[in-house]
Amino acid sequence: MVPFKLKLIPGESIFDQVCFAAIKSILAGELKAGETFPSVRTLALDLKIHPNTAHKVVQHLIQERWLVAQPGVGTVVAQPPKARAGDRKRLLEDEVEKLVVEAMRVGAGLHEVQQAVSDTWSDLRGLKVVSNDR
Amino acid sequence: MIVETRGLSKKFGRFEAIEDLNLAVPEGSVFALIGPNGAGKTTTIRLLMNILRADHGDVTVLGTPSRKLGPRDFERIGYVSESQKLPENLSLAHYFDYLRALYPAWDRALETRLCDQFELPPSRKIKHLSHGMRMKALLVGALAYRPKLLVLDEPLSGLDTLVRDEVVNGLLQQAADTTILISSHELSEIESFTTHVAFMQNGRLLLQESIETLQARFRQVDVTLSAVKELPQPLPEGWLLPAIEGHRLRFVTSHYQGDPELYQELARHFGAVKMECEPMPLRAIANSLMQARRRARGTVS
C-alpha cells in the first residue's frame, strides 16, 4: 500500500500531485527517514497511474534528495534535504505575493488568510514536522 | 510510430464510416481512442487489425502495412474486443492450451498469475462464463505473451466496478513495456494512466495529442460580468458552449494559455470581470466537445 494519502484531482498534473503528496507526508513525519518508499510498481497499481509516471516521480524525488536508492533494499526516505539558496526568498516573497493577490481577488481578508495559514501549519505540526529548513 | 494511418477511409454502402483518418500512436503510450457511439472507433480498430479492408489510405502497424500483417506480426499484437468469437465449448484451461501453442513467447507463469488474480475458473466452459469473466479471459489471452502492442476495443464496458479495477491493474502491470491502444467510454477509469488522447466524431479525427497538452488547453470558465452584456459575435476562438445569463457567463475554452491572457481577452469583450477557471477531467472535456458538435449541427440544419 502507498503510505500517503492522495486523491488525484482529475485535470491537474499527476506527476506534480504525487510528488507533492509524497513530500508533504515526509515533512509531516508520516514517512520517516529510513523507511522504504513504495516501488514504482506499487505506486502505479495503487494510484492507478502509468508506470512511467510513477518512475518519473521516484526519479525526481531521488534527484531532489527526498529519497535515496539503496541497492538491494529499494528506495528509502532520506533526511529532508536542505533548502537550496533562493528557495526561502522565493517562498517568502514571490509565493506569498501570489497568495496575497489571490486572497484579494477572492475577497478573503488578511485575518482569514493568517488564520488559514496557521491552521494548516498546526495540522502538519500535529503530525510532527521534521523539516530542517534553517 | 507503433501505429500510423494516412488518409484512411472506409465506406459501408454509402455511409462514410471513416474519412481521411491520420492517426499516430507513439511507442510506449497508452493511447485512448474516444468519441461518441458510432464515431468509427471500432471500424478504425478493425482496419488496423486487418479485419476490414480500407477503401483508401495506408495503415502501418509495428512497421508493417496492415494488409500484410501475418502470424509473425500477430505474435507481437494482443487484440481484445467485446465481439470476439471464442471456442464456446472449450474449457478455459483448454482454451489457454490452444493459445499457448500459437505464441512462442507465451509465459506460462504469467498466465497462471493472471488467472489467479482474475479468479478465473479453469475447468469452466467458455459458454458458461459471465461477460466479465469472458473479458478477463480474453485479456489473459492477450497479455500472457507480453505483446509489443495491445489493442483493446471497449475492454471495460459492461463490467462491474471491481472487475474494471482488476482489468486496469492487469493492464498497468504491462504498461511499462507495451504500447496500449484502447477505445473506451469509461473515461474517468482510464484518465489517470492515459498518455495520449484521440477524439473521433462522425468518422473523423477531431484531435489527437498528449493528455498533458489537452488538459493544459481546456478550462471550464465562470465569469461574473460587471454589466449585463451580449456574447461577442463572432465568438472568440476556442470558446465552446458559451452561456450567458444576467451577470453570469460560463463557457469552456479550448485555447487556455494562462489566467492573465484569459483576463485580457475577457476584458476586451466585457470590461471589468471576475473570473474563475478550473482544469477539467477528461470526461468533461469529451462531453463538451460532443455537446459543442451537437449544438453546431443543430444550428446548421
Image (tube, rainbow, N blue to C red):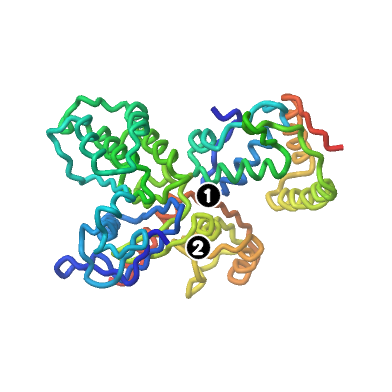
* Chain letter behind tag 2: B
In the rendered image of this protein, does residue B80 appear above or below residue B197?
above
Identify the residue at the far left of this view.
Answer: B89
Identify the residue at the far front of this view.
Answer: B104
Alpha carbon distance from label 1 to label 2:
13 Å
Q: Amino acid at mark 2?
A: Ser
Identify the residue at the far bottom of this view.
Answer: B234
Residue contact between numbered discs 1 and 2, judged by CB atoms under 8 Å: no
In the rendered image of this protein, does residue A71 appear above or below residue B85?
above
Give residue A26's quadrant in the image. Answer: top right
Instruction: Give how far across and how far down residue B212 sits, in percent.
Output: 53, 55
Residue that label 2 marks:
B254
Disc ID at residue B49 = none
Q: Amino acid at mark 1?
A: Gly
Residue drawn at (75%, 25%), measured in percent from left and top? A128
- Image quarter hosting the N terminus of chain B: bottom left
Disc ID at residue A11 = 1
Tally of numbered discs: 2
Disc 1 packing (10 Å; few <14; some 14–19; many ≥20): many
Residue drawn at (50%, 63%), measured in percent from left and top? B254
